[in-house]
Structure formats: C-alpha cells, structure tokens
Image: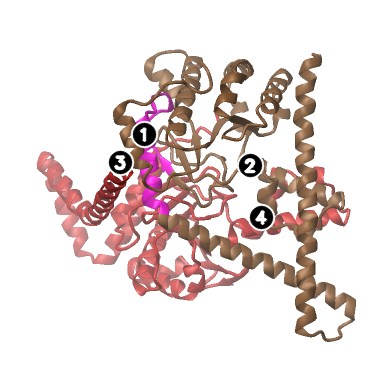
Amino acid sequence: MALVYEFVWRVLHVVLQLQRAAVSWFQARAWKRTWLLWRRAAGAVLLPAALGLAAQRRMGAGAGRRPGRRCRLLADGKALEKLPLHVGLLVTEESEEEEAQFTDIANVVVWCMALGISYVSVYDNQGVFKRNNSRLMEEIAKQQKEHLGSESCKYSSEFLNNGMETQEQMSRCHTVVKVLSPDDGKLSIVQAAQQLCKAVEQKQSTSKDINVTVLDSLLRESKNIPDPELVLKFGPVESTLGFLPWHIRLTEFISLPSHKDVTYDDFLHTLQRYASCEQRLGK
Amino acid sequence: MSWIREGELSLLERLSANILKAGPMPKHVAFIMDGNRRYARKKHVERQKGHTQGFDKLAEALRWCLNLGIHEVTVYAFSIENFKRSKEEVNGLMELAKEKFLRLLDEQENLEKHGVCIRVLGDLTLLPEDLQHVIAKAVVSTRAHTKCFLNVCFAYTSRYEIANAVREMAWGAEQGLIKSSDVSEALLSQCLYTSNSPNPDLLIRTSGEVRLSDFLLWQTSHSCIVFQSVLWPEYSFWNLCEAVLQYQLNYRSIQKARELHKEAETAQQLESDRSCVAELLRQGRNGKPIDAHSRHSALLSYTAGREERVSRFLSALQQKRDNFFEQMSSLTAVA
C-alpha cells in the first residue's frame, strides 16, 4: 500500500510542478495581453469620451518616448493612495551570476526611484548581489539614464558595502539603495547583543536596562534604514530566507513568480495591492 | 470543548493524509490564527463567540496535525500589541484563556494518553495574576510529556522575545557565567522562549493578511511561509493539506538554504574563536611569534572552554525558568 501512496504522491507533485511552471510562464506573458484587452473594452464602452482622450494621447505621443514614460511613472506614483517608504526586493531564485538578472533587478530599483520611494534594498541569501555590488550599481545607473533620461542625476543613489558608505554620483539623492545579504540579518542582531553584553560586563550598564527600544535603536544605528513596509519576493520559494528578521515585523510580503522579464505593470500591480491593505497594529 | 478533539478522519481524508505522508512532512507547524473577529462580523454573532469558535478550531487542527504525523504545533494566541484592544475585548480573551487552561487541568488524563506537553511562551508577568497561576500550573503538570508539543504564544512578540534573550545573556555576563565574546547566533537561539523546540518547518497565516505581525521572526528565517485567505474559524483539513503541499514543493530549495546558512554559522563561530585566541595569545606572549601547532591546540582548548561556559550558563537559565513556573504554580495551591 505504501508503494501506491508514494506513486500517487509523485504523480501529484509532478503535476503541481508543471502547473507552477505554466502559471509563471503565463503570468509573464498574459498580463500585457489582458491589460490591452481591458483597455480596448473600456475604449469601446466609453467611445465618445475616449475619442477626445485619444486625440490628446496622440499629441502626447508625438512629443517623444522618454517624457511620456517619465510622466506616466510620476503620475502612477501620485495615483497610489499610500507609498511605502522602504521596499525590499527579495530574490529567492537559484541564481547563476548572469547579466540579465542584474538588468531586471536594476529595472525594478529604477521604477521604485521614479515613483518616489525613499529606500530600496536588494537581498538574496547567497550574497550574489552583495558580491557584485558594483555591477548592480552600474546597471542601475544605465537603466536610470534609459528610463528617466537626462534628469537621472536627480535620482542618485547611495550604496552600502561592508558598512562603508560610498556616495555615487551627486549627493542630491532622493533614493537610498542598499544591497543586503544574510550577514545583515541575524549576524547584526548578534553583534548588537555582543555590544550590549560587553557594556554590562564592563559594568557600564546592567542587564535590566536592555529592552526592545534599546536593541531597536542600536540596530537602526548600524543599518540606518527604516523597517521595510513592503517586500517584493521574486521566485517560487515561499520563505524569507533570512531577510532582516528584526525589521520585517510588520512588512507586507507580496510574491511575483520571477524577476526575469518582470514588467512595469506587474510591479505597479503589487504596489496597488499594498496601497489597498490596511494594518490594524494589534488592535 | 476540550484541547484535542477526539475523532477520526473520513476515508477520503485518511487516503489523502497517507498520500501526503509519502513525501517529506513538516515536524513543526506554526499558526497565526487570524480572522476570528471578521468571522464573527460575517456571521453576525458576537465578537467573543468568534474567539470561542477560533479556539474550537484549534482543537480540531491539533487533531489533524496528529493524524498527519506533525508532533509539534506553535500558535499565536495573544500578542503584547493586543493589549491595545478595547478593555472589554481584552478581558473577554483573558477569561476565555483562563477557562480553557482550567479545563486543561481537568483533562489531565486525556493529555497524558496523547503525551501532550503544553508550553506557554511569552512574558507571563504582563497577565492578570490568577491567569498566571493557572497557566503555570498547566505547564508544570504536562512538563514530563514528550510525545507531542503544543506551544501557546501568549503575551508574546518576537522582538520582545529577542530583547529578552539578549537580557538573559547580559545576566549571564553579569553573573560571570559567560563572556560577552561567547554571544553567538546559536547561543541567542538557546536563550529564546523556544529554546526547547526545533525551528518551525511551516508557518501558516490565515485570513489573507500577508505579514508576520511580530511572530517568530528569528525562528522562521528558513521556514516555508504560507498565507491562506480562509478565516481561521472556517479552516478545514483541506486547507492544512494545501499548506503541507506548499511545504513539500518548497522542501528542496529551503533545505538547501538551511544548509548554506548552517555552514555560514559554523564559519562565523570558528572565526570568532580564532580572533579570541589570537587576542589571548597576543596578550600572553607580548608579541613573540607562535608556531602553528601550539596555535591550533590553543584554539581547541579555547573552544572546549567556551562550550563548557555556555552549557553551564544554559543550565542555569533553564533552572531559573523552571523555578519561575514552579513558584507560580505552587502559589495557586496556597491561594
């Protein structure tokens, strides 16, 4: 009997895996198509009004690609009811260190910048992004130029590497980009704990002085970033894989099937989902 | 309603359970049982009724877990943040807890039969005194059971737990049991309320919310996290099966991530021991060079010394915690 159960289990899992692959394949493609369909449908219903709009749009389109895109990004940012201050990008896919993934993640980072999000952190549990920090930076700068045109200098970024902060480009920065690895998670809590225990050992304070606020401010000092309100998780693994355990207390986790070829519409959709949910904070 | 609902699965459920069990099964499952109040609103019943139904569902879920061979369950019953709710609701919840823990004391026989050990994780001193006593009594009376474990997080938040663990380690340093350089990831884990449990393999949150709400942040770093949209009082056996399936689909990648993490942790410990030895040697020898062999033996003896310190400290800590519960429970006898 056990053999039969095992056989059924195996079949079930093959089916599920296939289904998962199919879903992510469709999601990558179907989104754009359905969006177009909806637009067309809406157009058909609101034909008279749409005519006027379409005329305007044609004129706008003539003015060049870049400003149009930039306007859209800014307008989208304003249209969202609430915008997270800090977005974490958590990549859970088995990653070979290939060019494409840096471009895809850089794209998302640049969209965040354009929407006016102040902090963006990029994390993977193998430390791929941390090891290739400069490569990601270059890619971000490149995408910035492409998406946001000549105004890109307005969105400069600051990168964190081994605790040393290096200022990239100009310092008039709006968005801080941090690349994180597992060492920024539990290890930094352990280091803070060591520091507090040392102070107690040297009779500078007592164990009774230690509480959540003390530990939190110590951790905040070392990282210098607010808690992320939103984490976009890319890839099929349903786990945080060690992403900043202390900081994700109230973080909303929203999954996307993959960071490969992720589209702006997918991205905007997750932010809309974030904007629509309400936190009760224990009440 | 008792703590573990008696009764068997239907034929179809049993069949599915057996199929699931052919794959890797989680040993420890954690639940955020969210949605009791929304359920009450939906059904137009009183809020308190929603909470009661939520508890009944827990009894049912524990039975399913046992049937699936899951022998450890951790649930988020009451957060420190929940004290912010209306006084009426908080009092209602405290009453419900007291009633259920009293009930548990009456059900000794049943719990003994299943070998259920109940632990309550959190800062009990934040609770009303009568409830503290009842809880302590329940914990002490089931302490010897080893077949399955139910951890109830009550007056708990994960940040509070971590800060408390740091406080305990600082206490150890104060008492001269450990040095501040002995503080490590492994030691911190051992000082958490959950020190006697393995980390959860699967965390389930119901009612469609997609956050951890300060629950087991440290322990679930490498757990499979499943968010389900069903409200907790409506949770079914099939929902649980779905979550287990998710766990199985993620099993290999998460296992790999765990191993990677384990390696990094070992490397960090070795690194820290090395630098401590180097510091000691530098002080002891006034800068004279030292050969590789004696450096190695110094490292070995330092590591052995550290391990001994840590284990002495941990048993002192366990003693302290056991004493707390024993004192609390014996107070009830007097009262």
Q: How many numbered discs sit on the rendered protein?
A: 4
| Residue A109 or residue B114, whichever sits in front | B114
- A240 in magenta: no
Query: In the displayed structure, would residue A176 be above or below residue A208?
Result: below
Q: Label 4 belongs to which residue?
A: B186
Q: Label 1 belongs to which residue?
A: B239
Tag 3: amino acid: Met
Query: In the displayed structure, would residue B108 be above or below residue A256?
Result: above
Marks 3/4 same chain: no
Q: Residue at 45% across / 33% down in the picture?
A: B65
Task: Kindly identify which chain the residue marked by label 4 belongs to.
Answer: B
Q: Residue at 23% across / 56% down in the picture?
A: A25
Residue A261 found in image quarter? bottom left
**Percent coordinates x, y for residue B212 in the rendering:** 51, 41
Q: Residues within 10 Å of mark 1 (few under 14, many from 20)?
A: some
Mark 2 and mark 1 residues within 8 Å of each other at the beta carbon: no
- Which quarter of the figure is the C terminus of chain B placed in? top right
Of tags 3 and 2, the one toward the viewer is 3
Q: Residue at 80% across / 50% down in the picture?
A: B312
Mark on residue A1?
A: 3
> What range is drawn magenta here?
B226-251
Of callouts 4 and 2, which one flags the residue occurring earlier in the amino acid sequence?
A: 4
Tag 4: amino acid: Ala
Relative placement, left or right, of B122 versus A6 is: right
